[in-house]
Image (cartoon, helix red, strand yellow):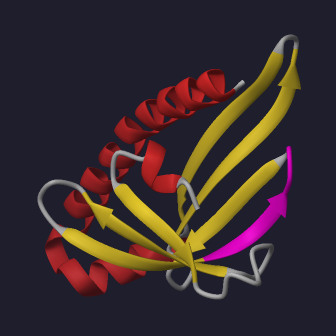
């Protein structure tokens, strides 16, 4: 997986079972945001080449994805991030009164990294074209 080339947080990713890479497959994401390091297990929920690649982190806490659409002269790539409802309960249990603050910080961080990720992917695609 090439995620480590373009993500400002996910330094590398690897399939749990390299023989299974489509819907239902799992991968490990090794992350570092400059303040801490952590590893997540994610499950692919949609894998349609040239259209979308979507995955959920953990037990369906957060959904990330890439959506692709043809446009004149190329492809529009949209990077998505969504907190799923069970996560709010997870954060409340884990962080108590600070849950909303932690969740807001994570959302801000995710939304700040998305444009950087897209710009990096664009550069890679243009160099390799």
- Check the picture and name the quadrant holding the N terminus: bottom right
Residue 12 x %, y %: 42, 63
Report the magenta residues as a range.
43-50
Between 112 and 26, the residue placed more toward the observer is 26
Q: Is residue 26 above or below residue 104?
A: below
Taking 28 as reference, is 122 left or right? right
Q: Residue at x 53, y 74 (%)?
A: 14
Residue 86 x %, y %: 51, 79
Instruction: Check the image and name the residue furthest to the left.
Output: 35
Q: Is residue 108 above or below residue 56?
A: above
State yes or no: residue 37 in magenta.
no
Taking 106 as reference, is 2 left or right? right
Between 6 and 93, the residue placed more toward the observer is 6
Instruction: Check the image and name the residue furthest to the front.
Output: 128
Q: Residue at x 36, y 58 (%)?
A: 11
Q: Residue at x 78, y 38 (%)?
A: 68
Q: What is the number of callouts on the image?
A: 0
Taking 108 as reference, is 86 left or right? right
Dominant SS in magenta = strand
Q: Is residue 43 above or below residue 125?
A: below
- Check the picture and name the quadrant holding the C terminus: top right
Residue 39 x %, y %: 35, 77
When asked about the image quadrant of residue 102, the answer is bottom left
State yes or no: residue 44 in magenta.
yes
Between 29 and 111, the residue placed more toward the observer is 29
């Amino acid at each position: 997986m090439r995620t480590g080339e373009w993500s400002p947080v996910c330094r590398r990713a690897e399939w749990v079972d390299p023989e299974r890479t489509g819907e239902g497959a799992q991968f490990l994401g090794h992350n570092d945001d400059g303040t801490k390091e952590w590893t997540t297990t994610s499950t692919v929920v949609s894998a349609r080449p040239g259209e979308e690649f979507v995955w959920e982190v953990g037990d369906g806490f957060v959904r990330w994805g890439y959506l692709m659409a043809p446009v004149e002269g190329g492809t529009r790539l949209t990077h998505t991030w969504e907190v799923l409802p069970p996560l709010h309960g997870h954060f409340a249990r884990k962080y108590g009164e600070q849950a909303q603050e932690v969740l807001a910080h994570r959302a801000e961080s995710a939304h700040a990294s998305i444009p950087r990720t897209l710009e990096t992917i664009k550069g890679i695609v243009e160099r390799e074209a």
